[in-house]
């Protein structure tokens, strides 16, 4: 491996997760087979919906809402924050025809565990500095109430000038303990 590559390990050994991809992909391709013709569907989601959710590795966004490949855009970011999704949502709506947005936050989210100023101070103590640290919003949850955060994100999108005014926008909580979802807005 090149010394230019970051030192990211898949486990306690010296293998990279990236080294496992070709073999894993072979299994995926074999299992997937011709279950649907994605070339025929194209890049526009057939259900005309975009789902915003957290990057948390425990979330299976397609399965949680019963979506299949080709039916929905899945936009993931830390905390599943609406404001961090705008660029993707504008393209999803204006270029690819979606007209519904689902926001999904989840229980046990790491974005409830820190405050903006504390996180920035922690980065600086590790030697990170400059405008990337000083000006970036790391978007922790603004309230300890998950329902309130979802309502804030829904309102943010409803009032955003680049989001279609006729958009259907709903907000949900995914309970990671049992996988269930419940509608908040």
Image (tube, helix red, strand yellow):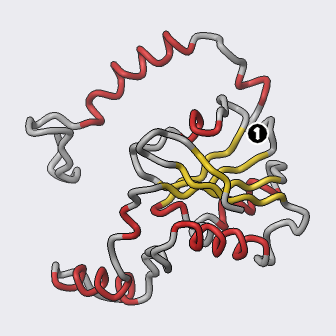
- List x then y, in percent, for residue 74: 61, 46
Q: Is residue 145 above or below residue 182?
A: below
Q: Quadrant of residue 94?
A: bottom right
Q: Residue at 78%, 72% (x, y): give it.
A: 158
Looking at the picture, how far across and down is residue 33, in whole percent? 58, 10
In percent of the image, x 67 and y 33: which residue is there? 67
Residue at the disc numbered 1: 45
Callout 1: SS: loop
Which quarter of the rendering shows the N terminus? top left
Q: Position of residue 54 (x, y in %)?
A: 49, 55
Give the quarter of the image for residue 68.
top right
Locate the C terminus by quadrant: bottom right
Residue 13's x, y, as percent?
Answer: 8, 35
Mark 1 Cα shell of 10 Å, populated few (<14), some (14-19), many (≥20): some
Residue for point 44% across, 75% down: 140
Image quadrant assignment for residue 178: top left
Q: Is residue 41 left or right of residue 138?
A: right
Q: Which of the two residues, 50 or 91, is positioned nearer the viewer here?
A: 50
């Amino acid at each position: 491996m090149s010394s230019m590559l970051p030192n990211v390990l898949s486990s306690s050994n010296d293998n990279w997760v990236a080294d496992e991809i070709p073999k894993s992909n072979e299994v995926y391709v074999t299992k997937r087979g011709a279950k649907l013709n994605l070339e025929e569907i194209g890049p526009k989601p057939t259900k005309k919906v975009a789902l915003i959710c957290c990057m948390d590795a425990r979330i299976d966004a397609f399965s949680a809402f019963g979506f299949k490949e080709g039916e929905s855009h899945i936009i993931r970011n830390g905390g599943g924050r609406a404001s961090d999704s705008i660029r993707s949502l504008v393209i999803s709506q204006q270029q690819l025809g979606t007209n519904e947005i689902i926001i999904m936050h989840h229980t046990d989210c790491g974005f409830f565990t820190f405050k903006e100023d504390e996180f920035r101070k922690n980065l600086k103590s590790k030697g990170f500095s400059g405008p990337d640290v000083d000006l970036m919003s790391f978007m922790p949850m603004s309230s300890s109430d998950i329902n309130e955060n979802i309502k804030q994100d829904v309102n943010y999108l409803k009032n955003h000038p680049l989001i279609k005014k006729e958009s259907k926008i709903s907000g949900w909580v995914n309970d990671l303990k049992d996988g269930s979802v419940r509608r908040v807005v």
